[in-house]
Image: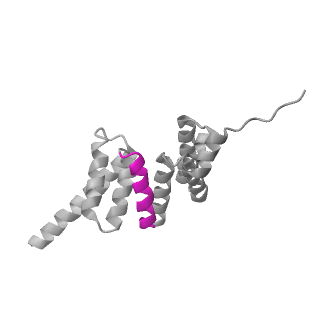
Amino acid sequence: MSTSPTTLPTDTLQRVIDGTAALNAFIGLGPDQLQAIAVIGYNSYEQGKIDEAEEIFQGLIALDGTKYFGYAGLGAIELSRGNVDAAHGHLSAALQRHPDEPTVLSNLGEVLLRQGKAEEAATAFQKALALDPDGRDPGANRARAILQGMNVVLQEMSRVAGA
């Protein structure tokens, strides 16, 4: 029995080569599959397997740069490494793709705070809180804690200045 080779969709392949289509247009992973890969990356990050997580997030961007998962993951990694400029770039890219993600907003707020941009940081934190009024999102809850800490510091500075 002879088998014929699979015909590759050359028009899709050419669009991928030209940069007008994501690699995933050729591979064909569904949104649930991409999200599952992102979860694996997140779990690797949480387990301290940072290099593995970084490769996964880079792979997600290569597969489909229109999704926010890979950028958000790389932003978190760079934030944990203290590379605030790189983190800022990745998190901004994530928010361009999905502007209503509390954890990404919280991470961006932390980056902005480390860059000395307290007002912009507070805005990012407040948006994260507004997206999570029930206090269920861990990223938004981190934003709540940071905002409370900022408030305590400001009150103490005001008290000392007035004394």
| Residue occupying image coordinates x 37% and y 57% | 108
Q: Is residue 120 magenta?
A: no
The percent coordinates of residue 78 (x first, y second) are: 48, 62
Residue 120, given in percent of the width and then of the height, sits at: 27, 60
Look at 46% across and 47% down and name the residue there. Answer: 68
| Camera-nearest residue between 24 and 77 | 24
Residue 94's place in the image compared with 133, above or below, is below
Q: Which residues are magenta?
A: 83-99
Left or right of 72? Residue 6 is right
Q: Give residue 89's position: percent from left, percent from top.
A: 43, 60
Which quadrant is the N terminus positioned in? top right
Asked if 118 appears above or below 62 in the picture, the reply is: below
Numbered circles on residues, count: 0
The residue closer to the viewer here, 15 or 71, is: 15
Q: Say left or right for 66 vs 99.
A: right
Which residue is located at x 80 percent, y 35 percent?
5
Question: Which part of the image, by quadrant, shows the C terminus?
Answer: bottom left
User: Foreground residue, 130 or 93?
Assistant: 93
Majority secondary structure in the magenta region: helix
